[in-house]
Image (spheres, rainbow, N blue to C red):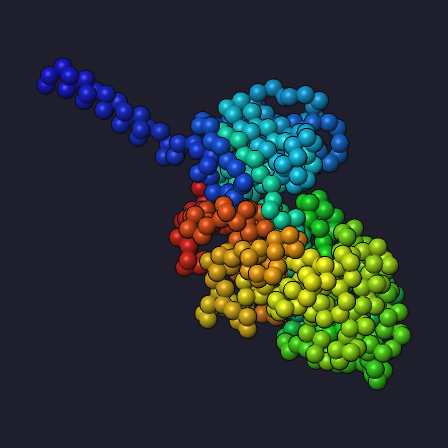
């Protein structure tokens, strides 16, 4: 063997030994991480920051809110890493090896919910204009770490964060989901669990559908029979349930701590059988209806001609507004097939004024546009584009919840265990492949406040059943609400989604393993 050949042989052998001696880890490249929603900009720098038993989280300043945000991250990292990361306060940059959360307030492009995450060998610096931005940045930190970081028990490291800079901020200000707790009741723990999941995907609104034909789910102290009687059952005849006002306030606080706003809905004048069964005077004939456990719609109406109906509604709105810090109350207005249109219109106009009188803005399903859409009322487009277009013509903004694209209770396909298909079958790709800003030509981006994916619960009554419908499609709606349309594409998204299978598994989410995705869920790495 010539000297040259011998040298080449030695060099190749050395290279191979280095290559195979490393743990099977891909070279660190921040842009290859599977973040959902996809950040606006990612610049990789190579190399990585390692969480060690010397790592702590430093927050700038002494505010309770900053410490709480820091503690939220520490509580997510410590169980799975086995580290004892502490939260400390500082007025200037911490020593190398630590995570630093700071509020700069000067980076206008980031807005109130955006953040900049700078990762180097020596430090992780998360900065934002507002605490909400830091909270969203924390979700990104979680998603850059291995999926096993979401496990509840200590896992083997290393715990690397790829070096680079992420600048990120949302496309829409309203990024939400809705939980129908009226058809089937979901207890406070299920609601909190869902709020945690929404937060992980940077969503910021949870709309609670609190009343319908089958159940009234929120305590109203001036009309106790609404829950005493109207909360007694649900679809299929189960035991139903309701939230006391204390529990509702607990849900609101839990959401607020995760920068999520609760929007309560009292549906009216239709979808009111539970109220009509509980308060006799709400019926025109003064006779209470029977409780209803079926799944028909459009058969009920409040008596719109009685003055006492409006006194009742004012009591409900007053009590709900008093325990709802968010700016919106949702008054429903959908499928009022048992209400004459000449009665529906003045009813909806009067109720909008009552909501405003109690200091809140109105959100309502798109039929509200058949009435007068008052200033600041938001029209939730679900079924009829022409209604939403009428709303735009009256100067209203639109919340995009098109049933054919965004209804989480739609079956994936005809074999789905749960769900309905009156609007469409919505497989994971169809749920992702649309852009709210050009779905309906007459509804422009500037008319749209954001996106909401509702889960109606006629066919699901337990957390795992609901999760089968909600996940993985919710991740796509989160990305549609956050990531600019020009950065979104199904082929690229489905790869990132495939890698979220192990994250959802680590978070004990019972997601539907759609055949549209090559899931990487053999084990949680
Ligand atoms: N439409 C009804 C819901 C629910 C839904 C199920 C709206 C606004 C069908 N109204 O969607 O109450 O029954 O997919």
Q: Hey, which residue is sitting farthest top in the picture?
A: 3
The quadrant holding residue 238 is bottom right
Q: Position of residue 82 (x, y in %)?
A: 55, 34
Q: Position of residue 195 (x, y in %)?
A: 65, 51
> Residue at image x 58%, y 66%?
403
- Residue 197 visible in the current orientation: no
- Residue 410 visible in the current orientation: yes
Q: Position of residue 479 (x, y in %)?
A: 54, 49
When the figure is inspected, residue 309 is found, relative to residue 9, above or below; the finding is below
Split into 4 quadrants, where in the image is the C terminus? top left
When the figure is inspected, residue 218 is found, relative to residue 273, above or below; the finding is above
Q: Position of residue 193 (x, y in %)?
A: 63, 52
Nearest the camera: 170 or 77? 170
> Residue at image x 79%, y 50%?
325
Split into 4 quadrants, where in the image is the N terminus? top left
Location of ligand 1 given as a quarter of the image:
bottom right
> Residue at image x 71%, y 44%?
257
Q: How many marks?
A: 0
Query: On the picture, is 186 further left or further right than 408?
Result: right
> Residue at image x 71%, y 67%?
369
Query: On the picture, is 291 further left or further right than 523?
Result: right
Q: Hey, which residue is sitting farthest left in the picture?
A: 1
When the figure is inspected, residue 267 is found, relative to residue 512, above or below; the finding is below
């Amino acid at each position: 063997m010539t000297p040259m050949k011998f040298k080449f042989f030695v060099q190749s052998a050395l290279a191979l030994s280095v290559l195979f001696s490393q743990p099977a880890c891909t070279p660190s490249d921040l842009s290859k991480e599977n973040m959902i929603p996809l950040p606006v900009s990612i610049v990789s720098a190579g190399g990585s920051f390692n969480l060690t038993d010397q790592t702590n989280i430093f927050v700038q300043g002494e505010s309770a809110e900053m410490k709480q945000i820091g503690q939220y991250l520490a509580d997510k990292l410590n169980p799975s890493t086995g580290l004892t990361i502490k939260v400390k306060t500082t007025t200037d940059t911490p020593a190398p090896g630590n995570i630093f959360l700071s509020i700069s307030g000067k980076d206008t492009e980031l807005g109130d919910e955006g953040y900049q995450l700078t990762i180097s060998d020596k430090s992780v610096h998360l900065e934002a204009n507002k605490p909400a931005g830091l909270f969203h940045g924390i979700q990104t930190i979680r998603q850059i770490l291995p999926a096993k970081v979401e496990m509840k028990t200590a896992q083997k490291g290393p715990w690397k964060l790829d070096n680079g800079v992420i600048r990120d901020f949302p496309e829409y200000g309203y990024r939400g989901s809705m939980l129908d707790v009226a058809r089937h009741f979901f207890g406070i723990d299920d609601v909190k669990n869902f709020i945690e999941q929404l937060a992980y995907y940077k969503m910021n609104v949870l709309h609670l559908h609190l009343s319908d034909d089958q159940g009234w789910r929120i305590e109203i102290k001036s009309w106790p029979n609404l829950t005493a009687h109207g909360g007694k059952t649900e679809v299929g005849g189960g035991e139903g349930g309701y939230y006391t006002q204390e529990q509702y306030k607990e849900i609101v606080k839990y959401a607020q701590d995760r920068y999520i706003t609760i929007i309560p809905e009292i549906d009216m004048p239709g979808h009111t059988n539970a109220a009509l069964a509980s308060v006799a005077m709400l019926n025109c004939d003064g006779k209470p209806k029977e409780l209803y456990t079926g799944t028909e719609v459009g058969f009920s109406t409040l008596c719109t001609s009685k003055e006492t109906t409006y006194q009742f509604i004012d009591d409900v709105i007053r009590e709900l507004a008093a325990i709802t810090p968010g700016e919106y109350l949702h008054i429903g207005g959908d499928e009022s097939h048992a209400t004459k249109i000449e009665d529906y219109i003045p009813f909806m106009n009067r109720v909008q004024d009552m909501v405003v009188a109690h200091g809140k803005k109105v959100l309502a399903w798109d039929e509200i546009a058949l009435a007068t859409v008052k200033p600041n009322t938001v029209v939730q487009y679900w079924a009829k584009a022409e209604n939403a277009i009428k709303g735009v013509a009256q100067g209203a903004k639109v919340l995009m919840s098109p049933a054919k694209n965004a209804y989480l209770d739609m079956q994936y396909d005809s074999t789905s265990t749960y769900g309905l298909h009156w609007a469409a079958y919505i497989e994971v790709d169809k749920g992702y492949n649309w852009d709210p800003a050009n779905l309906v030509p007459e509804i422009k981006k500037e008319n749209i406040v954001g996106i909401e994916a509702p889960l109606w619960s006629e066919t699901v009554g337990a957390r795992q059943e609901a999760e089968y419908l909600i996940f993985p499609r919710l991740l796509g709606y989160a990305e549609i609400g956050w990531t600019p349309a020009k950065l979104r594409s199904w082929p690229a998204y489905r790869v990132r989604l495939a890698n979220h299978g192990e994250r959802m598994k680590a978070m004990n989410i019972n997601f539907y393993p759609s055949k549209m995705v090559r899931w990487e869920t053999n084990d949680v790495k």
